[in-house]
Amino acid sequence: MEREDSLVTLVRDRLRLHQGPPSRRLAGALADLAQTGLIVPGTRLPSERDLAQAVGVSRGTVAAAFNALCEEGLCERRHGSGTYVLGAPTFGGLLQPGAGSVPADLSTSVVPDPSHLVLPPLDPADLLRAPSGHGYDAMGDPRLRALLATRAPASIPASIPASIPAAGPASGPASVPASGPASGPASGPASGPASILVTAGAQQGIDLAARVLVRPGDRVLVGDPAYGGALSVFRRAGAYVAAVDLTSPAAVEAALARHRPAAVYVACVDNPTGAVPPLRHVAELAAAAGVPLVEDRTLADLVYDGTPSPEPLATAHPYGTVTVGSLSKVLWGGLRVGWVTAAEPLLARLTEAKVDADLATSVVAQRLAADLLERNPVGPWLAELDRRREHCLAALAAHLPEWTWTRPAGGLSVWARLPGTDTDRFAAVAREHGVAVAPGSLFSPDGRHRDRLRLSFALPPDLLGQALSGLARAWHAYRA
């Protein structure tokens, strides 16, 4: 009874963060608790009658919520026993201990190792050098910031009106002007090192943007599918994540009017699909609506087949865009070095959030990253990734002809469709055959894409071939 009372308290707390019909709010609250581990796999949920009485809803509402959770694969009904929570996959689980304990890991869209890098001569004394001496330089190492400035948007204005709140109010979006301050001195570009804040990877950059822009109960617009790490950040911030077709101007305009979001999150190269769609209209519509934009440019350098690197959206929404970047995909993720940039005073608020989070990014990582950037242009690595992409697509066609996919124009992964398959369940079968994969539900705000997998093609060709052979064996076993 004590356990059920505790569960009811948690459910009531999470209900306030969800909107919509009562059954949807209840299903969302229970899903949050399951996905964050507050309800562990194997837990028997209270009966429909008991939960309805405790939460103050009808028994039919609880039944509808349980049905939705079962359809999403988060729960199962056991005849005569009740409704139980299943061990649903989570995005963070891809990097948890044990997640990589398989011979072939296609689940994480990362640089598999740093062997492609030209290494600099290492001087420990130089790696420990910081302008402040103590190493707590909130904005980051000046040399690294100067190098990163060449990757940042070229038209971030120096400042935005001080009226922009630190976070969008729960009843509507932050007030961001569409074309600049209504009064005051004109702002010049701030595209140099002064506009760069070094972060512990792009994931922290997204988290800082959420801390500054989003409050519990706010809405955030994302594409569908969308990067699972961003979805996790916004959910943890207490936001309701609303899916929209970002490639459709009409859909974006309608979603902005309907949801009045606190922010819109976009990725210039889509993760998981590898698509590189034109998204300037998203920035223009967000600017017109006064809604901040978070642009994830982590994969901006990894585009193939002569496709140009996407234009930074800050050029269309300069006063309300937080641009996030990373060195994890062009150098190595283990460095944990990324960056954000924005106009003032938004940049100052991001810096305050960074200091609150961890004081400063590692000096050693920053100094090493600067040395590596100077010695490792992206061209050779991009060419190698292109070869690995071709190898992956050829192996998929040979070993798994029933699967379909669209040729990725960028990124590190293939978004494959498995006909008539629940990929949450197939992922468990694949692991039994020595291959880790990322099921499509991890990349959807509402658990869709359950017939999809994200497959990394970044492994060396020999390992990639072994992985896809194992995946084919898992597929045949699953279909048997």
Image (cartoon, rainbow, N blue to C red):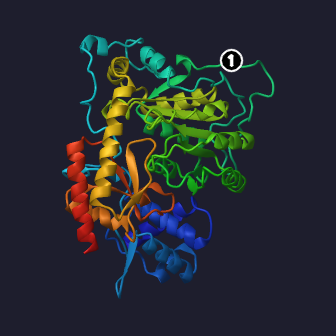
Toward the viewer: 151 or 23?
151
Q: Say whether residue 107 is visible.
A: no
- Binning the other alpha carbons within 10 Å of mark 1 as few (below 14), some (14 to 19) or many (20 upward) gives few
418 vs 356: above or below: below
Residue at 50% x, 20% y: name it.
150
Q: Position of residue 443 (x, y in %)?
A: 45, 55
Q: In the rendered image, which quarter is residue 142 located in?
A: top left
Toward the viewer: 251 or 76?
251
Toward the viewer: 135 or 71?
71
Q: In the rendered image, which quarter is residue 133 located in?
A: top left
Residue at 55% x, 31% y: name it.
350
Q: Position of residue 97 (x, y in %)?
A: 25, 49
Residue 247 horizontal side relative to residue 112, left or right: right
Residue at 43% x, 60% y: name it.
441
Q: Quadrant of the C terminus?
A: bottom left
Circle 1: element type: loop
* Residue under label 1: 188
Q: Say whether residue 254 is visible.
A: yes
